């Protein structure tokens, strides 16, 4: 499987996916940490993939979206953007509305 196929498969297999520096429990940069806090605050079930674990993945993600930075957020296969966009959408309430409209499970951890 090529890196592009791996990335594509992960995006299609997870309702909410974040390519990030570090892990959801231990983000390794401030921007990834902010995205993790937003997702946790919304109580969304999401998957984080650590791009620091693999240089090919780190570059592959940037090539896949033609977006130069990490974190990168996907919802139901759609690229949303990075930390700034997520933060703005969260503050305006747009992120929560979009997640609800797309049928993303909220309070995922509470029911687990």
Image (spheres, rainbow, N blue to C red):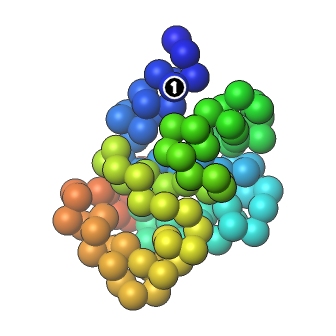
- Asked if residue 102 is positioned above or below residue 23 in the image, the reply reads below
Image location (x, y in percent) of residue 86: 49, 71
Foreground pick, 112 / 85: 85
Residue at the far bottom: name it. 92
Give the residue drawn at x 49%, y 55%: 73
Classed neighbour count for the residue bearing mark 1: other residues with Cα under 10 Å, few (<14), some (14–19), many (≥20)? some
Q: How many marks?
A: 1
Foreground pick, 26 / 28: 28
69 sits to left or right of 85: right
- Asked if residue 111 is positioned above or below residue 60 in the image, the reply reads below
31 sits to left or right of 38: right
User: Which picture quadrant has residue 26?
Assistant: bottom right
Q: Is residue 40 visible?
A: no
106 sits to left or right of 64: left
User: Which picture quadrant has residue 35?
Assistant: bottom right
Image location (x, y in percent) of residue 71: 62, 56
71 sits to left or right of 78: right
Give the residue drawn at x 44%, y 72%: 42
Foreground pick, 109 / 36: 36
Give the residue drawn at x 73%, y 57%: 27
Label 1 residue SS: helix
Residue at the far top: name it. 1
Image location (x, y in percent) of residue 44: 42, 61
Residue at the far front: name it. 66
Mark 1 lies on residue: 4
Q: Is residue 84 visible?
A: yes
Give the residue drawn at x 41%, y 52%: 79
């Amino acid at each position: 499987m090529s890196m592009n196929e791996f990335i594509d498969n992960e995006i299609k297999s997870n309702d909410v996916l974040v390519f990030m520096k570090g892990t959801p429990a231990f983000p390794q940069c401030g921007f990834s940490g902010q995205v993790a806090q937003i997702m946790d605050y919304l109580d969304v079930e999401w998957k984080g993939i650590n791009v620091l674990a693999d240089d090919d993945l780190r570059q592959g993600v940037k090539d896949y979206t033609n977006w130069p930075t990490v974190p990168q957020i996907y919802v139901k296969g759609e690229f949303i953007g990075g930390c700034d966009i997520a933060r703005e959408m969260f503050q305006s309430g747009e992120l929560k509305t979009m997640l609800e409209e797309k049928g993303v499970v909220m309070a995922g951890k509470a029911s687990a």
